[in-house]
Each structure stands twice: as C-alpha cells, then as structure tokens.
Image (tube, rainbow, N blue to C red):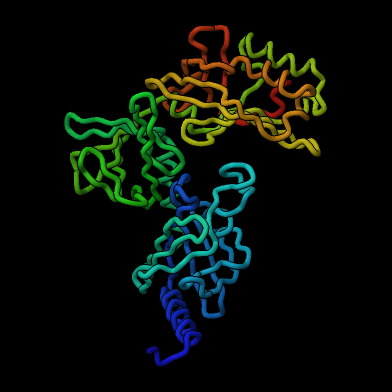
Amino acid sequence: MFDDSSANRIEASLAQVNEVLLSAKNGWLMKYYPNANQKYGGYNLFLYFSADGKVTAASDVAGVGERMTSLYSLKQSAGAVLSFDTYNSIIHFFASPDSGVGSIGTGMEGDYDFTVMEECTPEKVVLKGTKSGSLAVMTPVADGVDWDEYIEKIFKMNDIMQEYPAFIFEDGSYSQDLTVSWNRLVITQKEDDNVVYTYAPFVLTSDGLEFYQPFTLNGKTFTSLVYKDEGEDSYLYSPEYPSVHFIPDYPLNAMFVNNVWYLSFSGLGPVGQGFWQEIIDANSPVGAEKVQYVGFEPYGEGVLDYVWYTNESGFGFSDALMYYELSGKDKVIMEYSGYMGGEYKNFIPDGYATWWSIMLFMSRKQTYTITAVDDPRRPTKIKLTQDDRPTNTIILSKEPIQYPFIN
C-alpha cells in the first residue's frame, strides 16, 4: 500500500525531475536526433532551465550567438514528459514542417515533447521523443565552457565533414565503402537483386563524431570517431583501434545524390533542350519564364526528387521522384518512379502527357557517367552524360540558378 495519494506521488516525481534539470548551472548539452529513423542524424542543442519555468536554447544549427528563450513544463503521461510547449525557433526548428530541411510539408519530423526515461540524474538525462521515439541524451555542460566557443568547434568539424562525401574503411586487408548522407554514414550492399542500406547516424563533436548507437564493422565496434588532421592524408579513427582508419573518398556519384543540384536550359544538351523547349512553347499557366528553380534534391536512400519551384501565387511546386542506384564511383543509374506531386497541372497544361515528354530523357532506366566540370574533389558543377546516348548531357550547379528556362 502506498502511504501517499497518486496525485502527490506524481507531483513529487515531476518535482524531482525539475530539480535535476535545474541542477546544471551552465546548462545541458542535448544530443538530439529528429525523425523516427534518425534520417538526418543528430544535432547539438544547448539548454538552460531556470526556476521560473523558462528554457534558453542554442544549437549548432541556429549559429554562434543565437539564443531563444521560451517556456517549458513537466507533465505526467505514462511517465514524466518534458514539454517545450511555447514556441522556440531553435528547438522547434526540428519539428517545423517548413524548416527547409526534409520533405515538403513534414520537415525533419522532430519532437518538442519528450518522455523522461529511467536514467535521470545530475550526470545524465535520457529522453525519448513522444512522436518519433528517438532517444536524446543530455549531459551537463562543464563550468567554464562557453557555449559559443563549443558551437564554433562544431562548425569547424562540420566544415571538415562537408568536404568528405564518402569514406573508405580500412582494417588490414579488409575495406568497405561508406557514403555520408546528412549526419549518417551509409553502407550500400547488394544482396541478390536487392540493394540493402545500413545506417550509422551520428552527431558532430568538437573533435570528430559520436554515433547514435554502437556501430560495428569487420567485427570492431565503434561508439565515436576522432578526426586526425594530416592535410591531404587526414582521416577518422577510434582511439580503441588506432590502426583502423576511415579515409576520405570523393566519388562523384555520392556527391550527386547527397546534395542539391540545379539545372538550367543552357546547361542541357540537345536532348534535354528539346524537351524543355516543349515546355516553353506550351505557354503553360505559370509560364516557363516564371519558374524560379529546377533541381535534384535528396529524398531518401535510392530516391531523388526532381523539383520545380515558383513563387507565382497559387502554383508553388511540382516534383517527380526518381529511383537511383550507384555504380562504381562515377556512374548513377536513374529511372522515373511513376510518382508526380504538387501542382504539376498548373505548370504543364495537358498534365500527364506533356509531363511525360519532359521526363522522357529519364523515363526508362538509364546510366549516366558523372564528371567534374571544375574541382574533381570539391566540384561546384558536374556533368551527367547518358552512356548509350551521349548527346543527352546535363550540367548541374551547386549554386542556385534562378529562372532556369531563360538562363
């Protein structure tokens, strides 16, 4: 028999959690993974809880010097729930459907309500997103650590990782290719006729990265990796296995599928220009000259999104999903999935028929060879050439190209 009422026990439990939250005098560092599948990897959130029910946040996404203060609360719902229940642009960015990251209309699908797990001490608090189910771990920021100085170190590490689209794991005679997709390492393997992906989501640290959960390769288990700066011969490694290295690699096809690339009429070969000319001649409701951007965006493993944008009132965007496979380090095999979304009928007056002609240069499974137009390691422009139809070429730019039909 309990010697206290249920309401009193709940109140005491929530008060105990709040006492822990307030105990970190320099705030907490939360390693936060939005999305149920940790699709975008993890991010660093700094949180300071005050006795007046306010929380001040900073993050490695918002930037150095950026702060936002809002309210938080603790409530009971099958356990204690920490809720950031008034808007905080830094915290709610990860749950916003229009953050600009992730799918249009859903965003990164993060959380702002978290179940407080059993481990809740002044040394460590484990949370679980009530919507995504992803775990977030908070540890107290040591006294004397400046939040902005730490975020600057994260930015430097992010700049380093942005240089590396892929790695080669080398352990003696064993090697394995890995690509980088958002804050995840990805292993792609063929099993019979199926492509199988293995993911290792990570959060950046001041000197490398830390995995969401232990990651095993060739019988060795890694919880984190440290960056070793050796100039052009830099690599990642684990102090537990100093002879095992993750060596940067620069496959052009990985750069293509893991970044946003923009098209323009002048960057197409005669095949593509012929189809785009049909759009210009069709005199669609939007008008080709009013289309602001056309590009390829990562959508998910094995899927690219071919997207058109306009700010013309009432029209918005149109997109088509493309399946892809990577072959070697410079080839991509693409095939139109059959899916179209958005306001495509506003762009193309007779809908499917004309859209199909636009997509014809990608309407069957086709192999493209990718070359760098400029720097082969860090290209800002790449060229796709269809293997069995070399007049079908597409030059893509990392820099946005406005109004691509007239550029």
Q: Nearer the viewer, residue 101 or 206?
A: 101
Q: Could you say where residue 282 lies in the image, as x and y percent from the top left?
A: 80, 17
Looking at the image, residue 385 sits to the left or right of residue 316; the answer is left
Looking at the image, residue 214 sits to the left or right of residue 300; the answer is left
Asked if residue 118 is positioned above or below residue 6 in the image, the reply reads above
Q: Could you say where residue 193 lies in the image, as x and y percent from the top left?
A: 38, 24
Q: Quadrant of the C terminus?
A: top right
Asked if residue 198 is positioned above or below residue 254 in the image, the reply reads below
Q: Could you say where residue 61 lies in the image, as x and y percent from the top left?
A: 52, 51
Query: Residue 149 sits in which quadrant?
Result: bottom left
Total residue callouts: 0
Query: Residue 245 sits in which quadrant?
Result: top left
Residue ranking furthest to the bottom: 3
What residue do we see at 39% from left, 22% from top?
Answer: 329
What residue do we see at 52% from left, 13% from top?
Answer: 385
Q: Could you say where residue 91 lies in the image, as x and y percent from the top left?
A: 55, 59
Q: Nearer the viewer, residue 164 or 260?
A: 260
Is residue 140 visible to the viewer in this orientation of the structure? no
Q: Nearer the viewer, residue 392 or 146?
A: 392
Asked if residue 154 is positioned above or below residue 336 in the image, the reply reads below
Residue ranking furthest to the front: 1
What residue do we see at 69% from left, 29% from top?
Answer: 402
Looking at the image, residue 342 sits to the left or right of residue 170; the answer is right
What residue do we see at 33% from left, 51% from top?
Answer: 213
